[in-house]
Image (spheres, rainbow, N blue to C red):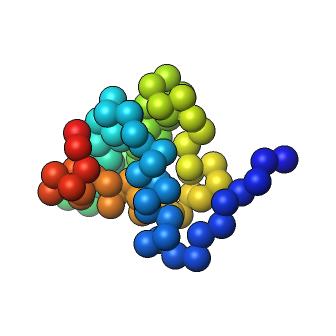
Amino acid sequence: MENIKRFNSFAEFYPYYLSEHSDSICRRLHFVGTTLVILILAVTISRGAWMMLLALPLAGYSFAWIGHFFFEKNRPATFQHPLYSLLGDFAMYRDMILRRVPF
């Protein structure tokens, strides 16, 4: 069994999260997946098409996991830190838009 790194806060986790996303293609794939998640949520809410919520995991995780397995060559942090990883996706998305994290 592998050691699971422990974090006391999201602020402590986020630098680790960014270090697991050093490959630009991986970050770009995350950006695409997170954009799709936001669009699906907007359409779901605006149309009341609640079944579309089932597409959220596929949209978000498929792009992210392709980025990790084929480009970053590591295991997604989601497997060990699901909540912090979800928050990390949106924080990195924001930071990419604000140009704090490179595309």
Q: Nearer the viewer, residue 3 or 70?
A: 3
At a point 45% along the width and 48% down the height, the residue shown is 19
Is residue 72 toward the left or the right of residue 30 in the image? Answer: right
Q: Position of residue 62 (x, y in %)?
A: 46, 34
Q: Is residue 55 above or below residue 73?
A: below
Q: Is residue 6 above or below residue 19?
A: below
Q: Position of residue 36 (x, y in %)?
A: 29, 42
Give the quarter of the image for residue 26.
top left
Is residue 43 toward the left or the right of residue 59 in the image? Answer: left
- Numbered label tally: 0
At a point 57% along the width and 58% down the height, the residue shown is 82
| Residue 102 visible | yes
Q: Position of residue 70 (x, y in %)?
A: 49, 23
Q: Nearer the viewer, residue 75 or 20?
A: 20
At a point 65% along the width and 54% down the height, the residue shown is 80
Q: Which quadrant is the C terminus positioned in?
A: top left
At a point 48% along the width and 45% down the height, the residue shown is 20
Q: Is residue 78 above or below residue 6?
A: above
Q: Position of residue 6 (x, y in %)?
A: 66, 66
